[in-house]
Image (tube, helix red, strand yellow):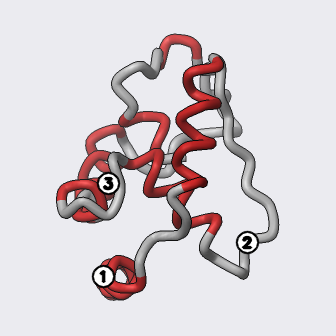
Amino acid sequence: MLTSDFRPDFDSTRRAPYTSRSRPVLSRSGIAALARRFSFLWEDGYAEGPVQAAIRFVIGNPAISTALVGYSSMEQLDYAIAASERGPLPGESLERLQAVWEGLAQG
């Protein structure tokens, strides 16, 4: 969910419009602020970017049995495959993620 808004090639005009029943939980600026808390993953070299970080997190999490990766081109499919071939995120990054989550839970 977060990753699609921060891909440089993402065209937000192609997204289905929100209806009265489906309102965003966070504003665009709120999503950006939230995503910055996770930016250490690509800034510190654990992943190339948010999409790769998300894929690598999911494939390394035994609590997640299915991951749906959306793509609209062969290039995006190749990128998703390459991300999964890098394997799960390293343990150190998962420890840092846990600290981020704890900070979010505390407000």
- Front of the two marks 1 and 3: 1
Residue at the image position 80 percent from the left and 61 percent from the top: 66
* Residue 65 found in image quarter: bottom right
Residue at the image position 53 percent from the left and 69 percent from the top: 88
Marks 2 and 1 sit apart, C-alpha to C-alpha, by 19 Å
Q: Residue 20, percent across and down?
A: 66, 32
Q: Residue 85, percent across and down?
A: 58, 54
Towards the viewer: 59 or 104: 59
Marks 1 and 3 sit apart, C-alpha to C-alpha, by 14 Å
Residue pointed to by mark 3: 35
Q: Are marks 3 and 2 in contact (CB under 8 Å)?
A: no
Q: Residue 78, percent across and down?
A: 60, 31
Towards the viewer: 88 or 63: 88
Name which residue type carries label 3: Ala
Residue at the image position 50 percent from the left and 12 percent from the top: 13
- The crowd level at tag 2 (other Cα within 10 Å; few <14, some 14-19, many 20+) is few
Towards the viewer: 56 or 28: 56
